[in-house]
């Protein structure tokens, strides 16, 4: 997510796209304003398009064909200046496969329309100047649209990235348009989208990137909407229930956990192994830490799953683009997050990991806590809050203080 400086705010309009300043493209159902193109499909939410490749001078293209790609749709273009480039739908690429560099002779005497037809584009049903190619990939679903005028390409468009459709859901409306400053101060466009949960802006840059800080919640997200489904408990040979309630006596008897001997697991948890900071202090006992925290939680008639749930809620609320503020169980909270390039994976080898640290503040009481994005998984599964000898330790009592409804 990236932040932008707003230049002009246009009040959201009502009704047709024309009232929002969009202009119809020919006789089609496509409307354009700034860098965005939207399609008014009756009985469904609108479709949103952005440039297939903002670096290509489309009117200067004399040749276009399908490329070999890098795992998805790709187009090869040739300009009148002899510049050839291959670009996949996700923006990667740029080179041409050896022996596949197109020449002017390859396209001589062939119209752009015929080249598009050979590349699998079909004429638009309403406008002869538009051509469509269906895409159904993991990140892009819908149509790539080529717009031709007087025998020259005007633009080639692609559907916004799936992260936008994940935010909007199936039913949404376009509530407004803004001119914004994008990367390096270049002009860009933003659309204000609205569904029953929230209102937010997306930028025309980077395939419809969420404008961080633009989110305005209209109601609280449910646990189900955030994907916080109940964890399926796994019982190990020792009787330890991963993701379940365990007695402290059972924890004291463990010689293995998560399929690993305790001695091996402790070694991995020490500083300088799976993590530079470590999950345990240099001389701490994993069993002693687990047992003490288990006693504390059970003495409050709670489970580790109870304490992990609000941490999961905050993490997923942020990661899924719902914003840095939320209301949960009647309390107001704010989020600060720091993202890192590298991932920290769990030493329990359970396919969990993170690249963020978070600070959660209860805005009603002022109490706050910090934790690694990996911690909710370790608390839920193993009752592990990290060792007292590491800076990433999160005391169970701190969770009770900040989430005071527990």
Image (cartoon, rainbow, N blue to C red):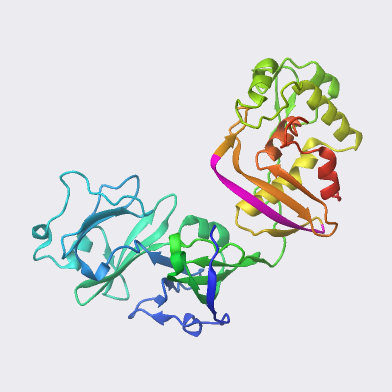
Q: Position of residue 275 (x, y in %)?
A: 61, 30
Residue 403 in sight here:
no
Q: Residue at x 26, y 75 (%)?
A: 128
Given residues 363 and 157, the one toward you in this image is 363
Residue 336 part of the magenta-drawn span:
yes
Residue 6, percent from left and from top: 54, 73
In this view of the protein, which residue sits in the foreground, 17 or 349? Answer: 349
Q: Nearer the viewer, residue 340 or 217?
A: 340
Q: Determine the image quadrant of residue 265.
A: top right
Say left or right for 278 vs 286.
left
Q: Which residues are magenta?
A: 330-342
Q: Nearer the viewer, residue 297 or 356?
A: 356
On the image, the x and y values in percent for residue 43 come to: 51, 71
Q: Position of residue 287 (x, y in %)?
A: 78, 21
Residue 3, above or below 380 = below
Q: Is residue 267 above or below residue 229?
A: above
Q: Is residue 259 above or below residue 22?
A: above
> Where the N terminus falls, by quadrant?
bottom right
The stretch drawn in magenta includes residue 181: no
Indicate left or right for 310 with 131 as reference.
right
Q: Residue furthest bottom?
A: 19
């Amino acid at each position: 997510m990236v932040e932008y400086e707003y230049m002009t705010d246009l009040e959201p309009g009502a009704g047709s796209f024309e009232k929002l300043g969009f202009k119809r493209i020919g006789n089609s159902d496509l409307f354009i304003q700034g860098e965005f193109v939207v399609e008014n499909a009756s009985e469904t939410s609108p479709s949103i398009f952005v440039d297939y490749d903002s670096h290509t001078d489309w009117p200067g293209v004399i040749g276009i064909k399908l490329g070999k790609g890098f795992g998805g749709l790709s187009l090869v273009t040739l300009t009148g200046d002899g510049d050839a480039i291959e670009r996949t739908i996700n923006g990667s690429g740029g080179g041409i496969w050896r022996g596949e560099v197109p020449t002017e002779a390859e396209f001589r005497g062939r119209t752009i329309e015929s080249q598009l037809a050979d590349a699998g584009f079909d004429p638009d049903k309403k406008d002869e100047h538009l051509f469509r190619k269906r895409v159904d990939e993991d990140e892009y679903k819908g149509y790539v649209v080529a717009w031709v005028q007087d025998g020259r390409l005007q633009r080639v468009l692609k559907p916004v990235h799936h992260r936008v459709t994940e935010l909007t859901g199936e039913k949404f409306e376009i509530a407004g348009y803004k001119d914004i400053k994008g990367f390096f101060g270049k002009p860009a466009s933003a659309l204000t989208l609205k569904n029953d949960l929230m209102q937010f802006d997306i930028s025309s840059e980077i395939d419809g990137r969420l404008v961080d800080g633009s989110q305005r919640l209209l109601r609280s997200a449910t646990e189900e909407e955030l994907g916080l489904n109940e964890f399926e408990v796994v019982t190990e040979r020792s009787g330890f229930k991963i993701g379940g309630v365990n007695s402290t006596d059972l924890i004291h008897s463990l010689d293995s956990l998560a399929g690993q001997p305790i001695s091996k697991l402790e070694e991995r948890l020490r500083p300088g192994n799976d993590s530079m900071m470590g999950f345990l202090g240099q001389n701490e006992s994993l069993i002693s830490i687990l047992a003490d925290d288990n006693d504390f939680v059970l003495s409050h008639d709670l489970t580790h799953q109870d304490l992990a749930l609000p941490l999961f809620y905050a993490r997923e609320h942020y990661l899924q683009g719902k914003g840095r503020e939320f209301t949960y169980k009647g309390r107001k909270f704010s989020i600060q997050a720091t993202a890192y390039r590298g991932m920290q994976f769990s030493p329990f080898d359970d396919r969990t990991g993170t690249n963020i640290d978070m600070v959660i503040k209860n805005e009603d009481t002022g109490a706050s806590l910090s934790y690694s994005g990996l911690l909710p998984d370790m608390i839920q599964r193993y009752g592990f809050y990290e060792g007292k000898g590491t800076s990433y330790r999160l005391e169970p009592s701190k969770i009770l203080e900040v989430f005071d409804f527990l």
